[in-house]
């Protein structure tokens, strides 16, 4: 049996059209659910991208002059090592190449900034996790005076607030997405159940003349898969095209005031692909459940 | 072709639909299963297609023991068996051609094969001119001919007919019986459940009589209601 046989495609198409109202309801619900999920993922990417320097507990970034000598960097490294563990829990060094890669990721939506920056101009840095958060300002002031240091960034509180706000938004959106997704699955199952009922005579004849179980089941399973896929494609286009709007729901960049959050088209595309795969899987899973539950072969 | 070996089948309740039935139907035979309503005729046919399971005993169909057949093999068994019913079971929204073609399409036959076989079989049953009609545009006899065409289009080894002439007038019944006889002459084993005495008496084929699930008579060239002396 060919799964692309004209018979299977015709029957699947027929099922979709026969139950058009239920089909549309299932597709729209799936699209709403996956758009909510895709939106959360886009927002998370925007936050991650903006705060990439401050992940893993880093609250203090010691930026070093691009032209600092090796001795100055070594001296600073030794000094930071001497502050472990009383004042600083851990530190790691980010060289110019790594800093440039990070910069490109952070400002991928702003080609003008990318044009003027080069690897040589990027300041290397030490990323440090303080032993006690309340001592960050004092540590920053102390390190700022060291030779070779450009400046010390410690916008920890702003990032914490931003992440907390995002966490609330994310949780609400995930609950909405989960609830609507359950509704979408129920609608897919119901649509398939109706299709099985509408075609009960044909199914009886198919069994009688020796159609295999898979041949009987596949059009119904394809129906659910198509519903999931179409809903997911709608969600994909919405999340992809509205990615900047979705990213802005999380507020402005906590590190660079007045600069909006954004995600690159590449990352939005990856999110979209994930959403499409998930929608297709959910559609196929829902119809698979319905077929097992309601179609005895 | 079909062998029942001490077969017992019980539905819910104490009464057995079939009790210790042992029957052997060789290839190419035409057999009537007769008996009153509830005697087990339909159960007999449904056991052959494995729509029902036996409680005891063995059933062999086309060289395969049906009871031990894996579920995924059942469709392949059914491709050797054509079925017709009193209520025709045609698909009302499909044409005559589509109803017959459906039986081939759903077992994965090529479009070329379908196009070559369906008109041929519709000519055989005398409906070559009515391929584009829908079932509701046909008489009862014509609808049953479509059902026969659908059952026979895959050239099955066995044709099971459950009261196929129950809804038809005597003239139309005679036409359907001639058709079944012709199919039997092609080598297909025909097993027909009926309680129409005139049909059985006219054909003088083997008769297996069931009563309360038991074989009470198995007679070559028999008649409906009594042992032919």
Image: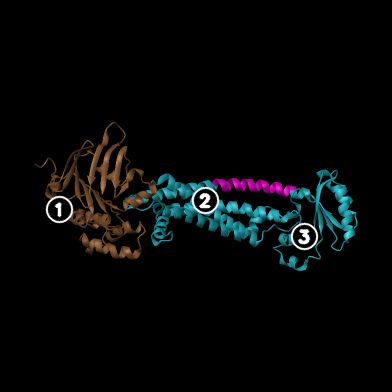
Tint applied to chain B in the drawing? brown
Q: Which residue is mark 3?
A: A99
B225, above or below A152, in the image: above
Q: Which residue is mark 1?
A: B174
**Distance from label 1 to label 2 (Cα)?**
55 Å
Question: Is residue A126 magenta-colored?
Answer: no
Q: Give the chain of mark 1.
A: B
> Residue A50, percent across and down?
72, 56
Q: Closest to the observer: B92 or A81?
A: A81
Asked if residue A31 shows in the view, the reply is no
Residue plotted at (47% across, 54% down): A24
Look at the image and tell me in which quarter the C terminus of chain B lies. Answer: top left
Specify the label residue A282 is tagged with: 2
> Residue B209, percent across and down?
18, 41
Q: Which callout, 1 or 2, points to the residue nearer the camera?
A: 1
Asked if residue B39 shows in the view, the reply is yes
The quadrant holding residue A75 is: bottom right
Q: Which chain is cyan?
A: A
Q: Give the chain of mark 2.
A: A
Q: Which residues are magenta?
A: A160-179
Q: Earlier in the sequence, mark 2 or mark 3?
A: 3
């Amino acid at each position: 049996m060919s799964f692309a046989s004209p018979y299977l495609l015709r029957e699947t198409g027929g099922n979709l059209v026969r139950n058009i109202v239920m089909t549309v309801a299932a597709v729209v619900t799936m699209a709403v659910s996956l758009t909510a999920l895709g939106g959360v993922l886009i927002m998370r990417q925007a936050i991650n991208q903006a705060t990439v320097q401050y992940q893993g507990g880093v609250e203090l970034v010691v930026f070093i002059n691009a032209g600092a000598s090796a001795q100055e960097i070594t001296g600073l490294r030794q000094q930071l090592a001497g502050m472990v563990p009383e004042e600083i829990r851990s530190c790691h060094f980010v060289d110019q190449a790594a800093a440039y890669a990070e910069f490109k990721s952070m400002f991928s939506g702003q080609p003008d900034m990318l044009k003027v920056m080069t690897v040589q101009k990027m300041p290397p840095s030490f990323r440090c996790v303080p032993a006690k958060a309340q001592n960050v300002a004092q540590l920053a002031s102390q390190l700022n005076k060291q030779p070779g240091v450009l400046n010390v960034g410690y916008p920890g509180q702003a990032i914490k607030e931003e992440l907390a706000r995002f966490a609330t938004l994310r949780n609400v959106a995930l609950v909405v997405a989960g609830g609507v997704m359950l509704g979408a699955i129920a609608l897919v199952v119901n649509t398939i159940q109706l299709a099985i009922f509408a075609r009960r005579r044909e199914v009886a004849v198919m069994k009688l003349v020796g159609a295999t179980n898979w041949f009987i089941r596949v059009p119904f399973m394809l129906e659910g898969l198509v519903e999931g896929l179409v809903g997911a494609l709608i969600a994909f286009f919405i999340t992809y095209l509205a990615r900047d709007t979705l990213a802005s729901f999380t507020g402005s960049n906590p590190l660079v005031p007045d600069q909006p959050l954004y995600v690159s088209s590449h990352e939005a595309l990856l999110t979209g692909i994930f959403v499409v795969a998930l929608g297709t899987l959910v559609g196929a899973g829902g119809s698979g459940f319905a077929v097992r539950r309601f179609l005895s072969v | 072709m079909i062998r029942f070996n001490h077969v017992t089948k019980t539905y819910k309740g104490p009464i057995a639909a079939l009790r210790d039935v042992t029957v052997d139907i060789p290839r190419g035979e035409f057999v009537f299963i007769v008996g009153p309503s509830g005697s087990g005729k339909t159960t007999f046919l449904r056991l052959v297609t494995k729509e029902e399971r036996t409680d005891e005993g063995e059933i062999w169909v086309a060289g395969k023991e049906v009871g031990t057949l894996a579920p995924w093999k059942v469709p392949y068994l059914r491709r050797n068996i054509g079925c017709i019913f009193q209520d025709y079971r045609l698909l009302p929204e499909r044409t005559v051609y589509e109803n017959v073609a459906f039986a081939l399409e759903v077992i994965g036959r090529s479009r070329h094969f379908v196009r070559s076989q369906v008109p041929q079989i519709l000519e055989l049953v005398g409906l070559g001119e009515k391929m584009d009609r829908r079932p509701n545009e046909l008489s009862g006899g014509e609808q049953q001919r479509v059902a026969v065409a659908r059952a026979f289009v895959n050239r099955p080894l066995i044709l099971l007919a459950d009261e196929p002439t129950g809804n038809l007038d005597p003239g139309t019944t005679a036409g359907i019986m001639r058709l079944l006889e012709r199919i039997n002459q092609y080598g297909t084993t025909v097993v027909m459940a009926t309680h129409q005495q005139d049909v059985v008496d006219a054909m003088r084929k083997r008769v297996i009589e069931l009563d309360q699930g038991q074989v009470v008579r198995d007679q070559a060239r028999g008649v409906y209601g009594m042992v032919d002396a």
